Image: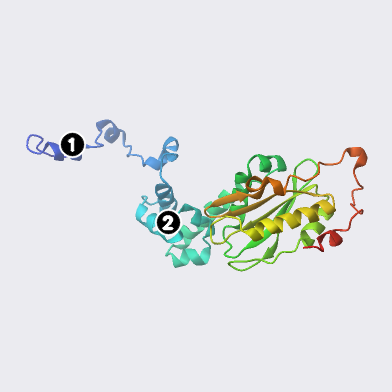
Amino acid sequence: MVGPTVDCREEPAAARAAFRGFSWERILSGRREREPWENASEEAALTDLELLGRLLAGPRRADCSEAGKLLESIGGLPGLLQVDAEIARAQGLSDAQAASVLAAAELARRLFPRPSRQSLLESPERAARYLFLRHARTSQEVFGALHFGARGRCVGEAVYFRGTLAACTVSMLPILVEAVRRNAESVVLFHNHPSGNPTPSDLDFALTAKAKRACEAIGVALADHLIFGREGSVSLRREKPSLFAAVAPPASPEKQAPKNRSRVPATRAAEKI
């Protein structure tokens, strides 16, 4: 085998370009040049565009042009979590490409387990990311709660209300009933802002104050209220600590109420909201 024929005296720049990557050792051994993505140590150095290009390419050589068009149309990498089969078809993805994108998004969701109460209080951002991954595809406002048991383990999670693009009518009754049913000691409320901006409104603060009073009436602590969107997240406990300052500490084992919490009906506690 003979290398590229170039007159190095006349065209030194062309010679360097022609011989770039040329290796007799590689040719004689029959090995091909490896793609950057094939080296696991280099994957972390790839850009979002390059990684998505590799995902869409499958066994073909990666082409970032497809990935660039997709990222631009969905508003960046976080937009992948909102892609469904219909959106994928509208973006011109093949069935195989759509399946790869949807599978990667689902893997990302599963990599974030439910947070414990302790980890949530230490890092509300991580809990908000978990919730964002879970509800990124919805285009309407959703309102739900995480319920935590005696040891801080999450014993329940549910969306209780769905609204429009701008609002969601909320009642604490089903949330408190579920807290009693699961014998929860604390609750974390959450809702999204479909606009992407997680900045809390005056209504969000007012609802949190009412929810705290209703929770305290049945002996359940309101640990936080998380608001999340594509642009980030906000912990109302951090934003306005005074809303949560009056939460009573858990009772000692000798003074704990019976497990059925029959001392205050949840329906009566929620009537004010």
Secondary element type, mark 2? helix
| Marked residue nearer the N-terminal end (2 or 1) | 1
Residue at horizontal 71%, vertical 55%?
208
- Any mark on residue 133, and which? none
Q: Is residue 141 above or below residue 29?
A: below
Residue at horizontal 59%, vertical 66%?
166
Out of 202 and 118, give the one closest to the viewer.
Answer: 202
- Any mark on residue 71, and which? 2
Q: Is residue 111 left or right of residue 100?
A: right
Q: How many marks?
A: 2
- Point out residue 54 in the picture as x, y percentages from the top left corner: 41, 49
Q: How is the image coloured?
A: rainbow
Out of 262 and 74, give the one closest to the viewer.
Answer: 262
Q: Residue furthest top?
A: 25
**Residue 69 visible, this angle:** yes
- Point out residue 90 in the picture as x, y percentages from the top left corner: 45, 67
Look at label 2 and name its amino acid.
Answer: Leu
Specify the quadrant that holds the N terminus: top left
Q: Which residue is mark 1?
A: 16
Secondary element type, mark 1? helix
Residue 178: name its quadrant.
Answer: bottom right
Residue 168: name its quadrant.
Answer: bottom right
- Point out residue 33 in the picture as x, y percentages from the top left corner: 32, 39
Classed neighbour count for the residue bearing mark 1: other residues with Cα under 10 Å, few (<14), some (14–19), many (≥20): few
Look at label 1 and name its amino acid.
Answer: Arg
- Point out residue 138 in the picture as x, y percentages from the top left corner: 59, 62
